[in-house]
Image (tube, coloured by chain):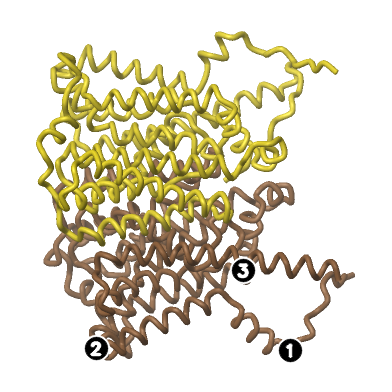
Chain colours: A brown, B yellow
């Protein structure tokens, strides 16, 4: 026997989809992004229309996008992963060392190595957090230092140069198919897979339930530990992939790679509407937040604002995004209260 | 009606000595004793002054941060306030202001920064982690925006020498004086006043604190203003100590401060922690780094050790709690209600 608990919407699926999109937080970011790109292009049409700029516009955000997607998944479970910058540095350097040791290594193998290494580092975070029952902020702050220390010890003042990397791998960093960079395509495919999983799969929906109320999720019988562990492994694996991207894109890898990137990843998620206390937000939003962050950094000098002021603008943007969240949440709460009164 | 309270289950000495904070103090004492006995040059004339000068900014900022974290909030913008304060001093001295006036102005700038954080967290009700990541970028952006890659270095010698001066004939740098004063002020504030009890109440349960008459919003606002003001003071010290005002001064200090506070036994969820633990935590990191450097251990390995120490310290609390729970649930011991702990 099936029981209908919620009345089906009276709107047609198509109109419902349109309404969802129009009311979504992601649309707001897309509009800001379009305005930014349009404004900058009016100023200097090379920003969009020269071949290199168009490529960079798509390519540059792909690294931060991967980090932001992983970070968003972790934040949705009411945790945080501060170690992603250090994981990126470790896997980027690992990529370089692998090529130095085995110059003929197929590129796919390096990607797999990056994913596995990152996933293993994420697994350490996840095990400490979920089995040790200790706050993720403390654990990942600790592993931020540990992982960074490992790469510093390993690399020392040594750096991997572009000449150490095979041409095929470096070409991948800038290669385009139908004017879309390959790395961006990979990042978007990853984003789509994670987003689809979170939106439709049981495991993905459970992450939201865990983030909304961890105690309730546990009492309800959800596999909280396993899901949180999974979120950290995913975040680590994506940071590992971002490390391979980093190596392919920049060619030179020193032990300082990705320094401070963890806060940018959290910032991208926050701008994208992922609530820091878990339970809400989408990876689409986080990815768009990452694109917006990176694009602003590129656009401001062209808009005549000294590059030194970029961070201040980014700060205002983050504050604006969380204030907007607050206003929207208050409005929703009022509407629900009104509906109950009526 | 007279209320009766249950007597403490453990004797006084156990409650004082068997705490998380005393464990940090004990480890610190162990490291100091070992270093004095075994590490060459640790007792040399330069080790202690440099150790104190290097850890002074972290120690200063960690004091008010302890109170903020004890309410269950966090302030990640402190390093940016240090940078902004440094730039303020630099720009004003460059414009011909005397150093004390510029320093006062920097403290004012710090207080304004703290007021913005505090207003957004306490009165608008936004999560402090998100707010202070935003203001981290904002304040740093203003600092870097004002000076760019320029650095102001022409400070009067009188003032830069003051920052590294010693007290009389001792090895102690002069900066120890404001540190000791601030330790005393914050210790009294946290442990001996109704304001301090309110801080723990807020950390344990904001709603309960509110209904029992604690001015939750005002307390948080005051704490954020205090934190940023002390961070600004640390910025003035930082500037004079190195004789350079730069926009990127003290980048990354926020994570060092948070690590020290957490190592000192303050719960990230709020409601527990003590100032002596934090002072011991900061000094532990400082002494350990200094001793390991003298043993020719590289900074990188020191980073690994500090990170592992942080993880181990929280894990040990968690494991101990698990052991205690297991003992309480065993058939030999009477069952006791456990306060619910939020999982994060």
**Mark 2 near mark 1, Cβ–Cβ under 8 Å?**
no
- Say which of marks 2 and 3 sits in front: 3
Give the residue drawn at x 75%, y 20%.
Answer: B331
Q: Chain of mark 1?
A: A
* Coordinates of residue B221 in the picture (x, y in percent): 52, 44
Upstream in the sequence, badge 2 or badge 3? 2
Give the residue drawn at x 53%, y 51%.
Answer: B121
Asked if badges 2 and 3 are on one and the same chain, I answer yes
Determine whether, in the image, residue B5 is placed left or right of residue A103: right
* Coordinates of residue A162 in the picture (x, y in percent): 15, 66
Q: What residue is disc 1 on?
A: A12
Local crowd size for mark 2, using a 10 Å CA cut-off: few (<14), some (14–19), many (≥20):
some
Q: Is residue A172 visible?
A: no
Determine whether, in the image, residue B169 is placed left or right of residue A63: left
Asked if badges 2 and 1 are on one and the same chain, I answer yes
Q: Is residue A238 visible?
A: yes
- Say which of marks 1 and 3 sits in front: 3
Find the distance from the CA under tag 2 to the CA under tag 1: 43 Å
Q: What residue is disc 3 on?
A: A328
Q: Chain of mark 3?
A: A
Q: Chain of mark 2?
A: A
**Quarter residue A20 falls in:** bottom right
């Amino acid at each position: 026997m099936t029981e209908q608990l919620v009345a089906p919407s009276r709107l047609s699926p198509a109109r419902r989809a349109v309404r969802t999109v129009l009311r979504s937080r992601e649309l707001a970011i897309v509009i800001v992004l379009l305005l930014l790109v349009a404004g900058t292009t009016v100023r200097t049409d090379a920003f969009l229309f020269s071949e290199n700029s168009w490529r960079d516009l798509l390519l540059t955000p792909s690294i931060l996008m991967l980090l932001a997607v992983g970070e968003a998944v972790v934040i949705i479970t009411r945790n945080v992963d501060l170690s992603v910058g250090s994981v990126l540095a470790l896997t980027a350097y690992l990529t370089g060392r692998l090529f130095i040791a085995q110059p003929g290594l197929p590129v796919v193998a390096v990607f797999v190595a990056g994913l596995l290494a990152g996933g293993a580092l994420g697994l350490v975070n996840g095990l400490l957090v979920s089995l040790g029952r200790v706050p993720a902020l403390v654990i990942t702050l600790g592993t931020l230092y540990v992982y960074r220390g490992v790469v510093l010890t390993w690399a020392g003042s040594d750096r991997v140069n572009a000449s150490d990397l095979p041409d095929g791998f470096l070409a991948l960093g800038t290669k385009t198919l139908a004017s879309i960079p390959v790395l961006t395509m990979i990042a978007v495919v990853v984003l789509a897979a994670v987003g689809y999983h979170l939106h439709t799969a049981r495991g993905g929906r459970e992450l939201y339930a865990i983030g909304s109320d961890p105690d309730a999720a546990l009492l309800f019988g959800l596999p909280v530990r396993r899901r949180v562990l999974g979120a950290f492994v995913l975040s680590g694996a994506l940071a590992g992939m971002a490390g391979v991207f980093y190596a392919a894109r920049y060619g030179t890898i020193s032990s300082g790679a990705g320094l401070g990137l963890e806060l940018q990843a959290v910032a991208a998620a926050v701008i994208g509407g992922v609530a820091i206390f878990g339970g809400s937000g989408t990876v689409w939003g986080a990815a768009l937040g990452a694109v917006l962050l990176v694009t602003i950094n590129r656009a401001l000098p062209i808009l005549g604002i000294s590059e030194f002021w970029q961070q201040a603008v980014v700060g205002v943007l983050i504050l604006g995004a969380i204030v907007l969240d607050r206003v929207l949440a208050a409005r929703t709460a009022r509407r629900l209260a009104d509906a109950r009164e009526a | 009606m007279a209320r009766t309270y249950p007597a403490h289950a453990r004797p006084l000495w156990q409650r004082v000595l068997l705490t998380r904070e005393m464990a940090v103090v004990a480890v610190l004492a162990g490291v100091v004793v070992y270093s004095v006995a075994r590490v060459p040059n640790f007792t040399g004339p330069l080790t202690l002054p440099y150790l104190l000068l290097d850890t002074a900014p972290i120690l200063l900022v960690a004091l008010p941060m302890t109170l903020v974290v004890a309410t269950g909030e966090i302030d990640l913008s402190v390093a940016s306030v240090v940078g902004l304060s440094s730039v303020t001093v630099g720009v004003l001295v460059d414009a011909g202001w005397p150093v004390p006036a510029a320093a006062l102005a920097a403290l004012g700038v710090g207080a304004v920064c703290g007021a913005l954080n505090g207003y957004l967290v306490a009165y608008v009700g936004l999560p402090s982690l998100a707010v202070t990541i935003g203001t981290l970028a904002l304040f740093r952006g203003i600092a870097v925006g004002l000076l760019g890659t320029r650095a102001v270095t022409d400070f009067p010698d009188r003032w830069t020498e003051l920052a590294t001066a010693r007290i009389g004939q001792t090895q102690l740098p002069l900066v120890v004086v404001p540190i000791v004063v601030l330790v005393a002020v914050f210790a009294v504030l946290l442990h001996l006043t109704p304001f301090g009890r309110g801080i723990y109440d807020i950390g344990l349960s904001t709603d309960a604190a509110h209904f029992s008459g604690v001015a939750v919003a005002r307390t948080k606002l005051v704490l954020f203003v205090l934190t940023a003001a002390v961070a600004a003071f640390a910025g003035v010290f930082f500037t004079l100590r190195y004789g350079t005002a730069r926009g990127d001064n003290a980048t990354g200090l926020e994570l060092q401060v948070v690590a020290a506070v957490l190592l000192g036994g303050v719960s990230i969820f709020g409601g527990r922690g003590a100032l002596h633990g934090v002072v011991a935590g900061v000094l532990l990191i400082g002494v350990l780094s200094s001793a390991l450097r003298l043993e020719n251990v590289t900074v990188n390995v020191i980073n690994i050790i500090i990170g592992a120490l942080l993880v181990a310290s929280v894990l040990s609390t968690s494991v101990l709690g698990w052991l205690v729970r297991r003992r309480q649930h065993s058939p030999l011991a009477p069952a006791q209600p456990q306060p619910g702990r939020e999982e994060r």
